[in-house]
Image (tube, rainbow, N blue to C red):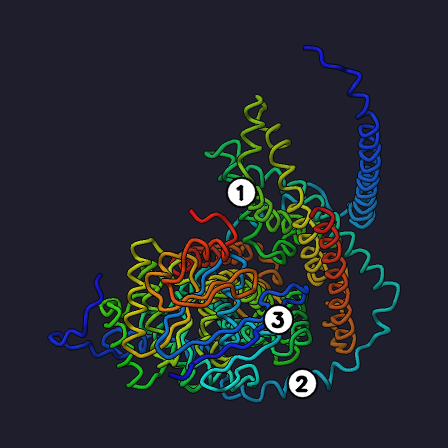
Amino acid sequence: MQGDVSDLSRYDHHAARIAAWRNRSRRVRYVCYFLITALIVWSVEEIVVADTDWSRISWESMLRSAQQFMSVDLSIFRSLMGPALETALMATLGTLVGLVLAVPVAWLGAMNISPLGRTTYVIGRGLMTLSRSVHEVVWGLIFVAAVGLGALAGVLAMGIRSIGFISKTVAEAIEDVSPGPVEAMRAVGASRFQILLFGILPQVIPVFIGNVIFEWDVNIRRSTIMGLVGAGGLGLALHRQMASYNYGGVATVLLVILLLIIAGEILSYYARKAVI
Amino acid sequence: MSAILEVRDLRVSYSAGREILKGINFSVEADDFLAIIGPSGAGKSTLIRCVNRLVEPTGGEILFEGRDLLKLGESEIRAERRNIGMIFQEFNLIERLSVIDNVLTGRLGYTSTLRSIFRAYSKDDIRNAVRLLDRVGLVEHLDKRADQLSGGQRQRVGIARALIQNPKMLLVDEPTSSLDPKIAREVMALIREIAREFGVPVLCNIHDVDLALEFCTRVIGLQDGIKKFDGPPDKIDKRVLADIYAMEVL
Amino acid sequence: MSTPVASAAKPLPEWSRFRFPQSLYKYAAALATLFFLWWSLGTLRIDIERLPGILGRMFEILSDRYWPPDVNHVLGSGYIAAVVDTFKMSYVATVVGLLIAIPLAWFGSFNMTPSRRFLYPAARLIVMSCRSVHEMIWTILLVAIVGFGMLPGTLAMTLFCIGFSGKLLAEAIEAIRKGPVEAVRASGANQFQVFLFAVLPQVRVAWTGIAIYTWDVVFRAATVVGFFGAGGMGHYLRESVQRVESQEVAAIVLSIILIVFIAELVSAWIRARIAKAVA
């Protein structure tokens, strides 16, 4: 069925404009792609070609190193159980410190309940960002400097690092509470604190617990390397094995680390299920 | 009988400049069951919430037992709210808490901060809570979590919570909109019964006109922020309804 | 359900918050927690008695030895070059890592994977393996195999990127609507075309946000990998720590915090711009 084709000429103008816009944005996109690729090529050239000492690397040397890792030195397995327990305990205490400190930070950083409005909100959000911006290795170094070598530095470092995630998710949950129960508590004549306690807190608890469990899981990973900066646990054992070039021993420590992480994953999976 | 509540020239407008309530006048006597009817957007919810200042009016007077609520400071209005019980459309219970803990939250206005943290209510409060739950027929569900109850049961918990405050007046905001028709009728009957028992006047927002006419002693018709009718239910006829709802009454 | 009039026959139950044996369990749990805490502190050889004054002592030590920070140390050209190196490493690692993570995310998404029996578990396993190992462990492993320099750092960050973004990208795929997928399938497209025309357009926005967020996190880690021999700013950190030049250490740490903070602001701004452009 042939329609009146001449009518379509009305749309030529629109089509031309859309095509022109498409061409423009396509051009912008291609420029972006080109820039990204250029940056990559330059970076890779610097990293791989200029910086790497290819004379010392060869497939043989890498294969040899890899082989050394394969020969797992199981003799030290037993001796790693103590450090493994230390690592797990450090992670647990660190998460505990983090969750306790996260409560006031979340209170500050939730727009609807922040005590002095915008000012304290910004402070709260700033603390959250600070906690998350600094890598746990750097926190570890800071606390080893401040309280000395040993597990306490690791616990504090992980505690401070954990504040960011927990308080951020809890603050967001607080900002998303359903207003009904809050209204009911206001109507009953409750004080500001009581409104917080009964209207808001019960709604936020599931999020809080779920995220604490998640953060505990992440902290197990962090805990394994705290020893590399002096905070005890499996990281210390790893450092020792590496320092004596006992790659077989390194492999064993890594194995134990992996087992610990898997155990943590299983535990946190079931713990989260129990809470939901 | 002196009026428990007197509302004079009540005005509410939001910052956008729109006036929601344009000068409302009415009073509530001690033995009233006052129903507020009207189309959606008429300002019924806003009106109810002005009485306990959940919404801040922009003008007028609200005299509760002789005191102008609009002149009270923050801690004073909190104290006055203890004397006004409120029942909500969506029940507004604390889902994670047990039924009895929900009823007890009605006493928070009388409980110190420290005791509230441990939920250490007085023995009298607890006994009253049990008694009220028995009165609304939920005493077997004392320890159940609130979110395990049906809609009708939850509303009854809300009723018990409002009454444990020993209120001088009840504000009821669309108590039946979230309920099945049969349950809705039972809940309305319960509210009327209990209000009479406790000698408490009721100011009730309701959109189901038939229910309103069946249970109330007086009706206020609201349309677009203006009071269009104020009188007993038997004076409501097709013409009045058409006027309030500005549409063909079926 | 008829409301009962006060039943004089049956007495009302007495209710108390503390009923046996539930309250016993609660007290036992509380005691167990306290005991666990005390035992942990002992096992970790944390001296409980020294804890109360800890804030004061921390402040003392930090203000004594670490203040003022040696700012000149971080303004030297060597350090600036190291900062640029860090950017380069994080950049390459993020791009390469994302390129690898995208197909892994596709295979590892439960709704859109071409093969639930093989590709799905395989992809999930790869991503999980990359996640499970801490990025610093990847770093020291690769430094041991490949030697010092930026190469092991970049490789380690790539693996970290795969682990980090793989999961997020897959979750974004699992959140798409079925409608467009069914439409494309119905037109006779193969798996790859379905991915291209039904999945990608829907996840484009979320993926852009994830990409930028990933770069942010990778950069944060890249600032530290040099500590373990993998190039970038971290190398200077290690050097100063080993020479116990505390004020240099302070300067480097502060510069790391500052640069990461700026990177975060920039990436947050970009994400906000994109969100606005799309909305």
- Residue at 82% x, 25% y: name it: A12
Asked if residue A181 is positioned above or below residue C94 in the image, the reply reads: below
Distance from disc 3 to disc 1, alpha carbons, whole Å, reads: 30 Å
Task: Examine the rendering and report whether any part of residue C31 can be seen.
Answer: no
Q: Which residue is mark 3?
A: A109
Query: Which amino acid type is shown beneath numbered disc 1?
Result: Glu
- Residue at 80% x, 50% y: name it: A51
Same chain for the residues under marks 3 and 1 in the image? no
Query: Which amino acid type is shown beneath numbered disc 3?
Result: Gly
Distance from disc 2 to disc 1, alpha carbons, whole Å, reads: 48 Å
In the structure shown, which secondary structural element does the residue marked by tag 3 occupy?
A: loop
Among the 4 quarters of the image, the one containing residue B214: bottom left
Which mark, by number, is residue C174?
1
Query: Which amino acid type is shown beneath numbered disc 2?
Result: Phe
Numbered disc in front, either 2 or 1 = 1
In the structure shown, which secondary structural element does the residue marked by tag 2 occupy?
A: helix
Expressed as whole percent of the image width and height from the top left, the position of residue A239 reads: 60, 64
**Disc 1 chain ID:** C
Task: Examine the rendering and report whether any part of residue C87 can be seen.
Answer: yes
Which mark, by number, is residue C59?
2
Distance from disc 2 to disc 3, alpha carbons, whole Å, reads: 26 Å
Counting other residues with Cα less than 10 Å from the Cα at mark 2, is it few (<14), some (14-19), or many (20 or more)? few
Among the 4 quarters of the image, the one containing residue A108: bottom right
**Disc 3 chain ID:** A
**Disc 2 chain ID:** C
Q: Nearer the viewer, residue A212 or C274?
A: C274
In screen coordinates, is A228 left or right of A185?
right
- Residue at 59% x, 23% y: name it: C189
